[in-house]
């Protein structure tokens, strides 16, 4: 899978991907319609202003219709701007939720290993998806509105003064040229800034995760320097983006102001009859004021588009970096395997080879685990014990042979994960209470079930001694818990989940003899009524098995 790398820019690919994830939703259309309505209200505002100004000599009474239109159109503009922002944000939120959902599904399906670190994955799911926000909320409506709204303003101007309309069209040429040039320069800078920001986010998350190890090795200064360099890189790239943004908005403002000035000079000279050339129209004060008030409105939708251009670039860069499968139609997952009773599990000439491994993790492994029996997998480090358990959970690829559950071959993509309780080598602790951590395995469990699992896993005495209860909070690193206690939490999880298969990966590693003996008694009880596979280096634990399978190291 190509993912999370600094992909080469491919605007066509990015555009296709964005088309797939941003459906032509009613919300984008509604937001566009609101921006167009803003232009119509702008025309009303200019008409009201012109009407009120012309009526000044006749007194306040004569100004009322113009002022009413002015205030009505002004209020409508405020309302429309607020609604457009709100509708755009809702559309963006819907798109981001859908994208995050499919991205997280793709990331979860990923086989362990590979170059992507947790930090990179976090940056992908959080920052890169977030970069779509401005594209949907602001850029798309602004782009569609920029194609319609200036035409409406131009038509209204042409009705009052065709020559003023012609001036607007002529001054549009340098404005658009400046927009294209500024857009191209901003695109590259914005891409580089985005990549640097993602790198910093990933680096930061990974270093925070590994903080105890960094402190233990006294590597905090080196890593702080590294983060500082990454932060400086982001800062300098952000400054470059801002420089380009200031330059481009400066040039756009210049051309917009120039155009308004030309219309003002024309309208003023025409009104006073001072034009050096003959023109086929004679403006009165109302028309002159109207076209003058309308001129800035002509450029407003395009200035709005230019301001949102950065959002487009961020979204293009983000979708280029996301995995291709995020944009594919969701593949129906194979039905989860359910088992009513402890199954017969047969490994038949199984070979496991990871994508990035030169040699297989294990080769041609054959053995049977009878229903309800305990099988110990033993062998030197790296002989493939964990990989065999991972294969059943869909975490390792089967590159040869097959696994039969009650005589039926486990299809590719189908796993035992739903029907098995698993205690991995490095148990996962999530921030939250003990209850949250144990109930991970079976969220429907009641307090009684949880307390029973805690007792069965032998956690109760240690908790009572330390004054901890089922609702005590533990941090993500299991702070305050010993290695043995963390293993017992993992075991409590496995005991809590009503499952027909138990998979234990080195459950007694790093425990002293007394602790190991106590835990083995717990494990022995947990195995009852379940087909159990235990990967272990402990002869004492292996002794409780009905069968020992010895894996040989591969040369
Ligand atoms: N996710 C992975 N990606 C690539 N290679 C892997 C992965 N997991 C394991 N391996 C490789 O597969 C081989 C078998 O590893 P495995 O962890 O299954 O052995 P093990 O017998 O359980 O070892 P230990 O007793 O040390 O836990 C090793 O060479 C290991 O480097």
Image (cartoon, helix red, strand yellow):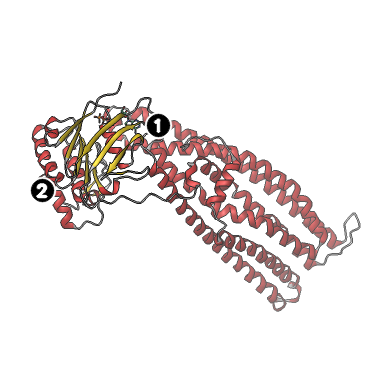
Gap in angstroms between the C-alphas marked 1 and 2:
46 Å
Is 248 left, or right, of 197 in this rendering? Answer: right
Q: Which residue is mark 2?
A: 464
**Numbered disc 1: secondary structure:** loop
Is 539 left, or right, of 356 in this rendering? Answer: left
The percent coordinates of residue 478 (x first, y second) are: 23, 41
Q: Is residue 60 above or below residue 478?
A: below
Query: Viewer-proximal residue, 65 or 78?
Result: 78
* Quadrant of the image where one finds ligand 1: top left
Query: Viewer-proximal residue, 271 or 404?
Result: 404
Is 23 left, or right, of 261 in this rendering? Answer: left
* Picture quarter with the C terminus: top left
Q: What is the number of the mark on residue 110?
A: none
Residue under the image location 51 percent in, 57 percent down = 89
In this view, the residue farthest toward the top is: 555
At label 2, counting other C-alpha atoms closer than 10 Å, the crowd grade (few under 14, some 14-19, many 20 or more) is few
Residue 360 visible (yes or no): yes
Residue under the image location 83 percent in, 63 percent down = 271
Residue under the image location 51 percent in, 58 percent down = 91
Is 90 left, or right, of 352 in this rendering? Answer: right
The percent coordinates of residue 290 (x first, y second) are: 75, 65
Circles 1 and 2, Cβ within 8 Å, touching? The answer is no
Whether label 1 lies within 8 Å of ligand 1 gets the answer yes
Q: Is residue 357 above or below residue 439?
A: above
Q: Which residue is mark 1?
A: 355
Residue under the image location 54 percent in, 44 percent down = 314
């Amino acid at each position: 899978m190509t993912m999370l790398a600094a992909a080469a820019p491919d605007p066509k690919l990015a555009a296709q991907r964005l088309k797939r994830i941003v459906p032509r939703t009613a919300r984008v259309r509604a937001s566009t319609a609101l921006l167009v309505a803003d232009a119509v209200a702008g025309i009303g505002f200019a008409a009201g202003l012109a009407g009120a100004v012309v009526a000044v000599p006749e007194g306040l009474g004569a100004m009322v219709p113009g002022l009413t239109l002015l205030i009505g159109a002004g209020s409508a503009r405020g309302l429309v701007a607020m609604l457009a922002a709100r509708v755009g944000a809702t559309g963006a939120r819907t798109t981001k939720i859908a994208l995050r959902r499919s991205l997280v599904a793709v990331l979860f399906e990923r086989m362990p290993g590979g170059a992507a670190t947790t930090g990179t994955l976090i940056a992908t799911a959080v920052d890169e998806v977030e970069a779509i926000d401005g594209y949907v909320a602001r850029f798309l409506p602004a782009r569609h509105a920029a194609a319609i709204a200036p035409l409406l303003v131009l038509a209204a101007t042409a009705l009052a003064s065709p020559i003023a309309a012609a001036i607007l069209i002529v001054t549009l040429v340098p404005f658009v040229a400046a927009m294209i040039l500024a857009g191209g320069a901003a695109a590259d800078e914005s891409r580089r800034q985005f990549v640097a920001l993602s790198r910093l986010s990933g680096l930061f998350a990974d270093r925070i995760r590994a903080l105890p190890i960094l402190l233990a090795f006294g590597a905090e200064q080196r890593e702080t320097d590294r983060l500082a360099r990454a932060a400086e890189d982001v800062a300098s790239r952000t400054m470059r983006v801002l420089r380009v943004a200031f330059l481009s908005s400066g040039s756009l403002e210049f051309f917009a102001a120039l155009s308004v000035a030309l219309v003002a000079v024309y309208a003023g000279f025409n009104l006073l009859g001072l034009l050096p050339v003959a023109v086929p129209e004679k403006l009165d004060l109302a028309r002159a004021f109207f076209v003058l008030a309308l001129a800035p409105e002509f450029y407003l939708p395009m200035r709005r588009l230019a301001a949102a251009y950065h959002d487009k670039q961020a979204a293009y860069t983000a979708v280029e970096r996301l995995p291709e499968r995020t944009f594919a139609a969701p593949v129906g997952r194979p039905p989860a395997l359910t088992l009513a009773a402890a199954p017969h599990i047969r490994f038949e000439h199984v070979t496991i080879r990871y994508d990035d491994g030169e040699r297989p993790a294990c080769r041609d492994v054959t053995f049977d685990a009878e229903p309800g029996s305990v099988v110990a997998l033993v062998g030197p480090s790296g002989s493939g014990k964990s990989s065999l358990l991972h294969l059943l959970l869909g975490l390792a690829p089967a590159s040869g042979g097959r696994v039969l559950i009650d005589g039926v071959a486990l299809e590719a993509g189908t796993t035992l994960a739903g029907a098995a309780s698993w205690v991995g080598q490095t148990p996962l602790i999530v921030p939250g209470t003990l209850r949250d951590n144990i109930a991970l395995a079976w969220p429907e469990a009641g307090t009684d079930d949880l307390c029973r699992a805690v007792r069965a896993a032998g956690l109760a005495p240690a908790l009572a001694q330390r004054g901890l209860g089922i609702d005590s909070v533990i941090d993500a690193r299991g702070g305050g818990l010993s290695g043995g206690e963390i293993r017992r939490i993992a075991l409590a999880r496995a005991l809590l989940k009503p499952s027909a298969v138990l998979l234990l990966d080195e459950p007694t590693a790093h425990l002293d003899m007394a602790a190991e003996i106590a835990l083995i008694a717990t494990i022995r009880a947990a195995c009852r009524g379940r087909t159990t596979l235990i990967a272990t280096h402990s002869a004492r634990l292996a002794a409780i098995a009905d069968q020992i399978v010895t894996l040989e190291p591969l040369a």
